[in-house]
Image: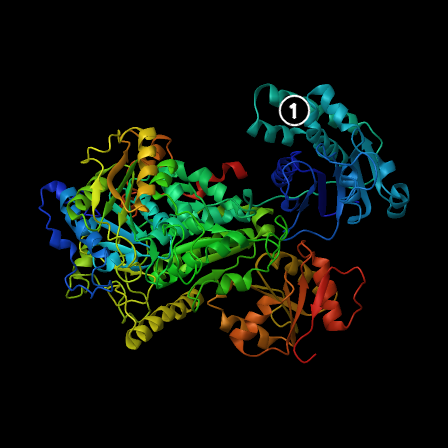
C-alpha cells in the first residue's frame, strides 16, 4: 500500500468492495434518454470493479464529450470529463504519472474514432496499461442525430442528406492494426457478457479496447437494438484463435461487415498477453522511474536534483 | 584597432557544423574572461543554405547583438545547390557565405575566406568594396589545410585557428575545449589541424590591427541559451514530466528536458500531435506530477482547447510558446513577436491564464521557476513566451545564478490527513471547487488519495465538480476563478524581484517600453542615447497577464512620451497596454520590425531619433514607426 495514496492497493489488504460504492451518494439525475444503451455501460462497469478489486479512490475515469462523456457523472471515482476526443492522452499520462491508479477512458464513436482517432491509434500503438470503452451507437446523439464514423454507408442525416458516401470505420481492425493487445466487442443488451468483458479488459496488462454497442433509441431508431447477438466464443459457427493475429483480423473484418447486414457478433476478438505494456517498456530502457513518479512529491525525504549540478557542459 | 569588444561572424552552409564551431569559439572567449552573446541566422533546411552565427565578446556586459561586426570567417557551403547554367531563383548559394555577409561588415573589418571553396570573382564588386571599406582580406585554403593534416570536414577547426592567429589568441584554450568533447584519433587530428593552421597564419603579414579584447570575470560563468534556462528553471521547480511534438524553435526546450529527465527520475513523452502533448501534461498534472508542454505558434494553436480545459478544471499547467514569424508556417527559423494576442486569448471563453515573457537568458530561468510556482499554487495554466531569438542565443551568465534550492512543492494540494478534515458534500464527494476561498484557490486532491474523489470537468460545475448551469453557481465560480488573477497580481507585486526590468536614469524625460527578447537591444540603445545627450529610460515588461498595471502606469506617468518597441506589425503589446490601462494612447508610439531579424541597438536609436526628434527615416530602414494616437 502506498504511503501517500493510501487508497491504492486497499483491496489487496482484503477489503471487500461493494458495487454500490461506485454509485455516487447523491446521484445526479441522468441526462440519458429512457432505453439508452449507456445505462448498460454504467451498470457493467459498476459490476466489473468489485471483480477486479479496485475502489473508487484508486480509479480514474477519464471521458470525452457526448452522452458517453457523462459516464463519470454517474460513476463514483476520481474522474475527468475532458474535451471532445482527448480522453486518451489525458488518461495515459495519468497512468504514467501514477501507475498505481486504475485508469479507464471512455467516449463515443465520434469521440474515439472521429475527432480522437489519432489518439486512439497512438495509444493502442503504445499499449498503455489501461482500458478504453467506446460507446458505439453509430450516431452523434447529443448533437441530435448526425452521421458518425460508424454509421453505415448510405446513412441519411441532416449532415449527409443524400446518404453517407463513406464506408464506416472498422473499429476492431483499427485497434488490432494499431497495436491494442486486447480487443473485444460487447453490447448493451448483453449485461452478463459486458461485465465479464470489462472485467477482463481492466485486468489485462496493456491497452484493452472494448467497442461497446449502445443503442440510441432517440436518434438511431432505424438501427438494430443489437439483438439478437451472437457471442463468437459460444457459437459453433465461428472457430478462430483469439491469440492469433491473422485469424483475429479475419474474424474482426467479418464481424464489422456483419453488423451492417444485421448480424451482431460480440465477444473477445484478440488477446495478446505477451506484449509488454508501455510502462514496462519505458522502465526497461530507463526512461521511467521504478517507483510511481507521483509518490515522489509526497516524500519528504526525496532528494531533488538541481540544474546547478548539470552545468559542467556549459563551462 | 584594439577595442573593448569583438564581433566575429562565422558563415557557411547549413549542416557544415557552423553552430557547434561557433559555440566552441564563444566558450573559448568566455573562458578568457569576456562576456559573450551570440546571434544565430539559419534556414529551415537540413543540408545547405546560408547560415551564420555572430559572436559578440567584450570586457563589459553584452546584452544583445551589436550593430554590424568586425570579423568574417566565410567557409564554403558544402551542400550548396546551384543550377548548371542560368540564373538561380535563390541566387548562387556557393558564394553566399561571402555575398550575404558583406553589408554588415564594419569599416576596417577582417575577412578570412576559404579559397578552396569560395571564389571572389563571383562576388560583385568585391575588390571595390574591399577598398572602399578598408577591409583586410586573408584568402586561405582551409580545405586543403584540413585535408592535409586531418579530414576535409575539419576546415572549421582550421578557420577557428586562423581567426585565433589573426586576433592574437593562442591555441591552448581551443585544445582544452576540444578535449572536453573529443578523444582518441579524432582529438589528435583536430589538434594537429588547429596547430598547423595557427602556425601558417601566424607567419603571415597582417595588415589589420584588430585584436581580441582582454577581460576577467569575478566569478565562474556558464554559456547557455534561453531554452536551457527555461528547462533548468523547470527542473529546479521539480518538473519531471514533459510531453511534446517537434517544432522549431520549441524543440530545443523539449530536447534539453528529454536529455535530462530520465536520469533525474522524470518522464519525457514524444507524442502524436500538440493536442495530445498538452493533454498529456494535463493528465500528468492532474495525477500529481509537475508537468509541462509547449510548442511554437502552429502547435500552440492546436493546444488551444486543452489550455481551456486546464483553465476550467483548474489543473496546473506550464506551456512554453517559442514564437517564430507567422502567420501559418511563416518563417520557421526567424524570430517575431506576433503571437502575443494568440497566446493571451486563444481558446473559447474569457482567458484565465498567466503569461510571462522573459527578456534575457537569466530572466528565462527565473520566470520559468515563477511559472511553475504560480501554476501549482494557483491551479492555473502559465505560458512562458520566448522566441527564436531568446531560445537560441547563447549568453554568459554567472554560474551562481543557478545555485539555488529546488522547489518541488505541489502547491495547493491537500495531504490525506487534510482531506479528512476538509469539507465534503453530503454525497461523500470532496468539495474540490468551493465557492468561498477569498484568494480564489480551492485546494485540490490527487487521484489515489483516500476520500478525495471529485469530478474535474470542462463544463461549468458545482463545488463537487458536477455539471451545473444555474446562474448563481455560474457567477460564483467565474468570480472565484477570476479572483485568482487578482491574487497572482498581488503575489507578483509583493515579490522581492519584479519581473519587470527598469533601465536608465530614473528621472529621464523619455521612455522606451519593450517586452520579451528585444530587451537587451533596447538597453544598449538607451545607453547610447543617453551618451548622445538624450534623456531616456526603459521599462521591459515580462508579466503580460495579469498585466502589471501599477508598474506600467507609474512608468508612463513619469515620461513625456514613450516609444514601444516590438517585433510585429500590429503593435500588439502597445494595444494590450492601452486596453489594460485605458489611457496613455497619446503618449505611446511604436517602433516595429517584422523582417525576420531582431532589432539591432542602432535601429532603436534611429527609431527614437525619428519619432522624438523628427529625424529623417533612412530609405533602407527595415523598421516602421506607428505614431501615437492623435499624431
**Is A110 positioned to the left or the right of B187 in the image?**
left
Q: Is residue B583 above or below residue B420?
A: below
Q: Quadrant of the C terminus of chain A?
A: top right
For disc 1, the neighbor class at 10 Å (few under 14, some 14 to 19, many from 20) is many
Viewer-nearest residue: B565 or A66: A66
Instruction: Examine the rendering and report whether any part of residue B265 can be seen.
Output: no
Viewer-nearest residue: B196 or B343: B343
Q: Quadrant of the N terminus of chain A?
A: top left
SS assignment at label 1: helix
Q: Is residue B193 above or below residue B301?
A: above
Pointer 1 residue: B190
Disc 1 is attached to a residue of which chain?
B
Residue B582: percent from left, percent from top: 54, 78
Q: Which residue occupies 21% across, 64% down? A: A30
Count of numbered circles on the image? 1
Residue A197: percent from left, percent from top: 21, 42
Residue A302: percent from left, percent from top: 30, 43
Q: Is residue B88 above or below residue A217?
A: above
Amino acid at each position: 500500500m502506498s504511503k501517500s495514496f493510501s487508497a491504492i492497493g486497499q483491496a489487496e489488504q482484503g477489503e471487500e468492495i461493494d458495487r454500490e460504492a461506485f454509485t455516487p451518494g447523491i446521484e445526479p439525475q441522468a441526462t440519458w434518454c429512457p432505453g439508452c444503451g449507456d445505462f448498460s455501460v454504467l451498470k457493467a462497469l459498476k459490476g466489473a470493479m468489485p471483480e477486479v478489486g479496485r475502489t473508487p479512490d484508486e480509479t480514474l475515469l477519464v471521458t470525452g464529450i457526448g452522452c458517453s462523456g457523462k459516464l463519470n457523472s454517474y460513476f463514483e471515482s476520481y474522474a475527468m470529463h475532458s474535451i471532445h476526443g482527448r480522453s486518451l492522452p489525458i488518461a495515459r499520462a495519468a497512468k504514467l504519472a501514477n501507475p498505481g491508479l486504475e485508469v479507464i477512458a471512455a467516449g463515443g464513436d465520434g469521440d474515439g474514432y472521429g475527432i480522437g482517432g489519432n489518439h486512439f491509434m497512438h495509444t493502442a500503438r503504445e499499449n498503455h496499461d489501461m482500458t478504453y470503452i467506446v460507446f458505439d451507437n453509430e450516431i452523434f446523439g447529443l448533437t441530435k442525430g448526425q452521421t458518425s464514423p460508424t454509421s453505415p454507408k448510405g446513412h441519411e442525416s441532416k449532415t449527409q442528406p443524400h446518404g453517407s458516401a463513406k464506408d464506416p470505420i472498422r473499429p476492431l481492425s483499427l485497434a488490432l492494426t494499431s497495436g491494442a493487445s486486447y480487443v473485444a466487442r460487447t453490447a448493451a443488451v448483453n449485461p452478463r457478457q459486458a461485465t465479464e468483458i470489462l472485467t477482463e479488459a481492466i485486468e489485462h496488462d496493456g491497452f484493452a479496447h472494448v467497442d461497446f454497442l449502445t443503442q440510441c433509441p432517440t436518434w438511431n431508431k432505424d438501427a438494430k437494438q443489437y439483438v439478437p447477438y451472437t457471442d463468437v466464443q459460444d457459437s459453433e459457427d465461428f472457430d478462430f484463435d483469439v491469440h492469433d493475429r491473422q485469424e483475429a483480423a479475419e474474424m474482426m473484418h467479418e464481424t464489422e461487415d456483419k453488423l451492417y447486414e444485421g448480424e451482431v457478433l460480440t465477444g473477445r476478438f484478440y488477446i495478446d498477453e505477451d506484449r509488454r505494456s508501455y510502462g514496462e517498456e519505458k522502465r526497461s530502457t530507463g526512461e521511467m522511474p521504478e517507483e510511481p513518479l507521483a509518490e515522489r512529491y509526497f516524500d519528504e525525504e526525496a532528494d531533488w536534483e538541481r540544474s546547478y549540478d548539470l552545468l559542467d557542459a556549459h563551462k | 584597432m584594439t577595442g573593448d569588444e569583438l564581433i566575429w561572424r562565422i558563415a557557411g552552409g547549413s549542416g557544415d557544423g557552423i553552430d557547434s564551431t561557433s559555440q566552441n569559439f564563444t566558450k573559448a572567449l568566455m573562458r578568457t574572461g569576456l562576456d559573450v552573446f551570440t546571434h544565430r541566422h539559419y534556414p529551415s533546411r537540413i543540408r545547405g543554405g546560408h547560415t551564420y552565427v555572430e559572436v559578440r565578446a567584450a570586457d563589459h556586459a553584452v546584452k544583445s547583438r551589436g550593430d554590424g561586426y568586425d570579423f568574417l570567417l566565410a567557409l564554403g557551403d558544402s551542400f550548396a545547390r546551384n543550377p548548371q547554367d542560368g540564373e538561380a531563383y535563390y541566387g548562387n548559394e556557393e558564394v553566399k557565405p561571402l555575398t550575404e555577409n558583406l553589408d554588415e561588415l564594419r569599416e576596417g573589418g577582417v575577412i578570412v575566406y576559404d579559397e578552396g571553396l569560395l571564389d571572389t570573382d563571383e562576388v560583385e564588386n568585391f575588390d571595390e568594396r574591399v577598398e572602399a571599406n578598408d577591409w583586410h582580406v586573408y584568402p586561405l585554403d582551409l580545405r586543403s589545410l584540413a585535408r592535409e593534416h586531418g579530414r576535409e570536414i575539419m576546415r572549421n577547426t582550421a578557420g577557428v585557428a586562423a581567426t585565433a592567429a589573426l586576433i592574437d589568441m593562442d591555441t591552448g584554450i581551443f585544445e582544452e575545449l576540444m578535449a572536453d568533447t573529443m578523444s582518441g584519433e579524432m582529438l589528435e587530428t583536430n589538434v594537429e589541424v588547429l596547430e598547423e593552421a595557427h602556425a601558417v597564419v601566424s607567419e603571415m603579414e597582417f595588415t589589420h590591427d584588430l585584436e581580441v579584447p582582454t577581460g576577467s570575470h569575478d566569478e565562474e560563468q556558464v554559456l547557455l541559451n534561453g531554452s536551457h534556462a527555461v528547462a533548468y528553471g523547470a527542473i529546479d521547480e521539480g518538473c519531471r514530466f514533459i510531453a511534446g511534438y517537434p517544432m522549431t524553435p520549441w524543440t530545443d526546450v523539449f530536447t534539453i528536458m528529454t536529455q535530462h529527465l530520465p536520469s533525474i527520475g522524470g518522464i519525457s513523452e514524444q507524442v502524436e500531435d500538440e493536442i495530445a502533448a498538452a493533454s498529456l501534461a494535463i493528465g500528468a498534472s492532474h495525477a500529481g506530477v509537475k508537468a509541462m508542454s509547449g510548442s511554437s505558434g502552429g502547435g500552440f494553436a492546436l493546444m488551444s482547447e486543452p489550455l481551456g480545459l486546464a483553465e476550467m478544471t483548474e489543473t496546473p499547467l506550464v506551456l512554453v510558446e517559442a514564437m517564430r514569424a507567422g502567420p501559418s508556417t511563416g518563417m520557421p527559423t526567424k524570430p517575431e513577436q506576433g503571437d502575443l494576442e494568440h497566446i493571451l486569448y486563444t481558446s473559447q471563453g474569457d482567458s484565465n491564464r498567466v503569461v510571462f515573457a522573459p527578456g534575457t537568458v537569466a530572466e528565462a530561468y527565473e520566470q520559468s521557476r515563477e511559472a511553475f510556482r504560480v501554476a501549482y499554487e494557483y491551479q492555473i495554466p502559465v505560458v512562458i513566451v520566448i522566441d527564436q531569438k531568446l531560445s537560441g542565443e547563447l549568453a554568459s551568465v554567472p554560474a551562481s545564478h543557478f545555485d539555488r534550492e529546488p522547489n518541488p512543492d505541489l502547491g495547493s494540494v491537500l495531504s490525506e490527513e487534510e482531506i479528512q478534515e476538509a469539507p465534503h458534500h453530503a454525497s461523500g464527494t470532496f468539495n474540490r471547487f468551493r465557492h468561498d476561498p477569498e484568494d480564489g484557490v480551492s485546494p485540490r486532491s490527487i487521484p489515489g488519495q483516500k476520500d478525495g474523489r471529485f469530478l474535474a470537468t470542462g463544463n461549468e460545475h458545482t463545488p463537487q465538480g458536477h455539471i451545473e448551469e444555474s446562474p448563481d453557481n455560474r457567477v460564483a465560480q467565474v468570480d472565484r476563478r477570476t479572483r485568482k488573477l487578482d491574487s497572482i497580481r498581488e503575489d507578483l507585486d509583493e515579490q522581492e524581484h519584479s519581473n519587470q526590468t527598469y533601465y536608465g536614469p530614473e528621472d529621464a524625460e523619455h521612455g522606451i517600453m519593450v517586452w520579451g527578447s528585444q530587451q537587451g537591444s533596447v538597453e544598449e540603445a538607451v545607453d547610447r542615447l543617453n551618451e548622445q545627450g538624450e534623456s531616456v529610460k526603459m521599462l521591459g515588461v515580462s508579466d503580460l497577464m495579469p498585466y502589471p498595471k501599477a508598474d506600467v502606469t507609474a512608468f508612463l506617468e513619469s515620461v513625456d512620451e514613450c516609444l514601444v518597441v516590438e517585433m510585429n506589425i500590429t503593435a500588439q503589446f502597445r494595444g494590450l497596454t492601452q486596453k489594460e490601462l485605458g489611457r496613455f494612447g497619446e503618449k505611446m508610439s511604436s517602433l516595429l520590425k517584422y523582417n525576420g531579424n531582431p532589432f539591432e541597438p542602432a535601429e532603436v536609436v534611429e527609431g527614437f531619433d525619428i519619432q522624438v526628434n523628427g529625424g529623417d527615416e533612412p530609405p533602407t530602414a527595415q523598421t516602421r514607426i506607428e505614431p501615437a494616437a492623435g499624431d
